[in-house]
Amino acid sequence: MEVGVMKSILRYLEQLHSEVDQSEVVSYIHELLDEDEPGDDTSEPKNECGWQNIRHKELKVNQNNGASNEAVMNSLQCSISKSPLLAAYQLQPNELMLIARICQKTKANCEQDYSVPEICELLPGMDDNLDRQYSAVVDLIDREILSTPHLMGVDYHYDLRALYGTGLRLNGLLWNLILGKDPIKFGLKAFAKGLGKPDSAIDSILKMIGGLFMHYPELTDNFTSNNGACFGRNINLALDAFLDALITAKGASRWIELCKKHKLNAFWQKCLLLIDYFNRELSTQVSPATMASLLARNPKERKNYVDLLAKDNLLSCKCLIEPHHPMFAVYLMELTPIALKALHGKTEASMKESSKEDRALSNSVYLTRIDPTQKLDQLILDQGTRELIVTIVRRLHNPQRDGFAEWGLVGASLTGDKSVQQGCNILLHGVSGTGKTFIAGVVANELKRPLIQINANAIRGSFYGESEKQARELFGEMRAAVKRLSPVFLLNEGDQLIHQRMSSPDRSADHAENTIQSVFLEELESFAGILIITTNLADNLDLAMSRRLHYKLEIKPPDYQARKALWRMHLPESIPGAADIAVESLANDFNFTGGQIRLVVQNACHEAYLRGKDSKLTLADLRRYAILESGTNFETAKRGIGFTL
């Protein structure tokens, strides 16, 4: 028997709950799968260090004493019991051997699909009896150990020929669990922060469900419930964990009130969340049969759930889903405006409008939406520039102040359009790494608006007249986005589009470039949105652009005090050894920008981490990479700046 392969899986499973870095564990298992051959149970992994030696001490003792296959199995089942999702499979020794053999064949031959006879050949103790083979394979599928990705529209419980004619695979979630990718841990870690906010708690749960589907390939793309498959063992475990996290979170008040008002038990709560997920995240409705397959643990329970959702649907009775009074099992469920408002505080119309806006941006070749996380208190600048940024943010918070309108300022718009007064074009110029893009994120985040980046490369066309057409299309989309989203637009390296006009307009390339300049000059004259342009080469900008820019801010390299603050910001206490590093000498000896400091810290941390267990970042690490950065800085000469405050 494949003791070597089983040892490899055992060693990996024992790491699932360790405190070490996950990437280290993933690398380790791949080495293990390469090192052992079937039947070779005497070889030792080379150069095991620290955590590996501690975790494998008992196993190595057994190996030295000629460990039996039974001892390996017992240890493996003990490790599996520590993972709730793995334990739910209730794997028996012969099933563990089947998994080990599939892993080995996949590793060696890149095989994925296996026929029923091949599965039975890999499953220890299986004889040639057709009934027993069929029953065993159906049981493996029902328990989510195997899956039938190619069996569409046929219930494998009743069609032996179809089952024998299709390919079987190791269940996708089980594969991910073997590789250490746990959707419960992933969801709770990635989206836990959102649970604390009433306006984003449900959104975080939906993202957790999305993470679960991502880890479970059978639930994505061509997911079908027609073949009678049941996914409830692991789906329920994950949803129970997500609901527990939601109920105990600070942002759960809206959810708790909804469940209490309508007396929703755990089953109906899961149904409501899954319907919301399908409606919002997948833009589709969901049938009772699909819902039953997702939540049922076995075929009998699936049949009961289909009947319950079709005949006694509590969500329909409470007017939380449509249709309100389903007559047949074949119908599609969608949340009502009442449910949407209770869950998200929004009406159906606003939800659909938001979805429409996201689709419009996702289809654009010119614009990309970014959700900024930068905060004003993280902004490290000289006092004068920082105060100007604060002034700009305050101005843009409410551009239609009634009292200010009475001052009667003369506008630039020839049409008298007052909305032009609400626009603001900002130029941020300075050497690379001083935080120009970071400032754009701060402005958008402080205004609580999305940040939309302009893809400059998509504007230039290959044919005569195409660039002008595409530049006008860009501004058409920007004006539409201003009405829907009121975002902040970001054009990085703006000099590539609005540079000085070419002197040879007879050349087609120069003519195209000059046309783009003309479109920008014309459109910015009456643009009612917020546009931030960054550049390292302000001297290259067209002089006519200066009048279209409301603010022209030079972001200077940080001084000594700012450099100290930047070093401290990039050396949080979560980095081992960072608290012991005195940053004063680094700030004094190296005139770095924030971007350079970030690179130095990243490179030094990588080297420190690769030293192994108990490694710490030291001042020597940082100085080594700081000296390297100083010698390779491309800013060989300080450039003059054409715009002043």
Image (cartoon, helix red, strand yellow):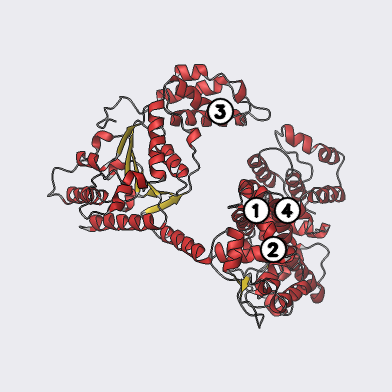
For residue 67, which numbered disc appears in the image?
A: none
SS type, badge 1:
helix
Helix, strand or loop at label 2? It is helix
Q: Residues within 10 Å of mark 2 (few under 14, many from 20)?
A: many
- The type of residue carrying mark 2 is Lys
Give how far apart the Cα atoms at labels 1 and 2 are. 37 Å
Mark 1 / mark 4, whichever is N-terminal: 1
Q: Nearer the viewer, residue 607 or 94?
A: 607
Give the secondary structure at mark 3: loop
Q: Which residue is mark 2?
A: 270
| Residue corresponding to mark 3 | 571
The answer to which of marks 2 and 4 sits earlier in the sequence is 4
**Discs 2, 4 touching: Cβ within 8 Å:** no
Q: Say which of marks 1 and 3 sits in front.
A: 3
Q: Earlier in the sequence, mark 2 or mark 3?
A: 2
Question: Which badge, 3 or 4, is on the more N-terminal residue?
Answer: 4
**Mark 3 residue type:** Leu
Mark 2 near mark 3, Cβ–Cβ under 8 Å? Answer: no
Q: Please, what is the three-letter code of the amino acid marked with disc 4?
A: Asp
Contact, mark 1 vs mark 2 (Cβ under 8 Å): no
Residue 107 is tagged as 1
Q: Residue at x 66, y 65 (%)?
A: 272
For label 4, the residue is: 244
